[in-house]
Amino acid sequence: QVQLVESGGGLVQPGGSLRLSCAASGFNLSSYSMNWYRQAPGKERESVASIISSGSSASYVDSVKGRFTISRDNAKNTVYLQMNSLKPEDTAVYYCNRPGPTKFVWGKGTLVTVSS
């Protein structure tokens, strides 16, 4: 059974950091590129970071470039998102999934709230 479980979210002050994890099960993570997505209240879900299957290349949406870093450990079937210099506009539920139109079943996500 394919499952994605996101964790690591929480309440953080502006300028703070968080590290999100996405634990994958039921499939071989090393075969897939993976993205981190986020959905803020009242907004559509957007992709913020992408990493290819080997982990050797990543890309980011402009709004998080230089602040977020996506990485993966295929041996642990886990994808990470290191988020630094967090801003209130980063507040959202964060999810991981494949890029493109074919998706795994979405996990529940992990809530990140950036507020003083």
Image (cartoon, grey):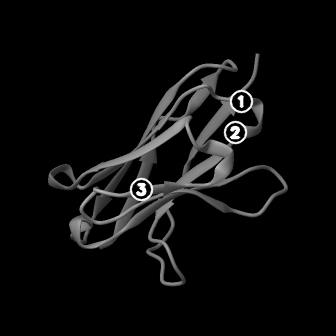
Q: What residue is drawn where x is 62% and y is 36%?
A: 112
Distance between the alpha carbons at the discs numbered 1 and 2: 5 Å
Residue 51 seen anywhere in this rendered image of the structure: yes
Q: Amino acid at mark 2?
A: Asp
Name the residue type under label 1: Lys
Q: Quadrant of residue 58?
A: bottom left
**Which SS class for mark 3?**
strand
> Which residue is labeled 3 in the image?
58
The residue mark sitting in front, 3 or 1, is 3
Mark 3–mark 1 distance (CA, rounded to whole Å):
22 Å
* The N terminus sits in image quarter: bottom left
Picture coordinates of residue 80, whole percent (x, y): 38, 44
The residue that label 2 is drawn on is: 90
Q: Between tags 2 and 3, which lies in front?
A: 3
Looking at the image, is mark 3 or mark 1 earlier in the sequence?
3
Asked if disc 1 and disc 2 are in contact, CB closer than 8 Å, the reply is yes
**Above or below — where is 68 with respect to 33?**
above
Mark 1: which secondary structure? loop
Q: Which mark is residue 87?
A: 1
SS at badge 2:
helix
Percent x, y of residue 97: 46, 65
Q: What is the crowding at mark 2: few (fewer than 14 residues within 10 Å), some, or many (at least 20)?
A: many
* Amino acid residing under circle 3: Ala
- Residue 12: image location, x then y, percent: 63, 22
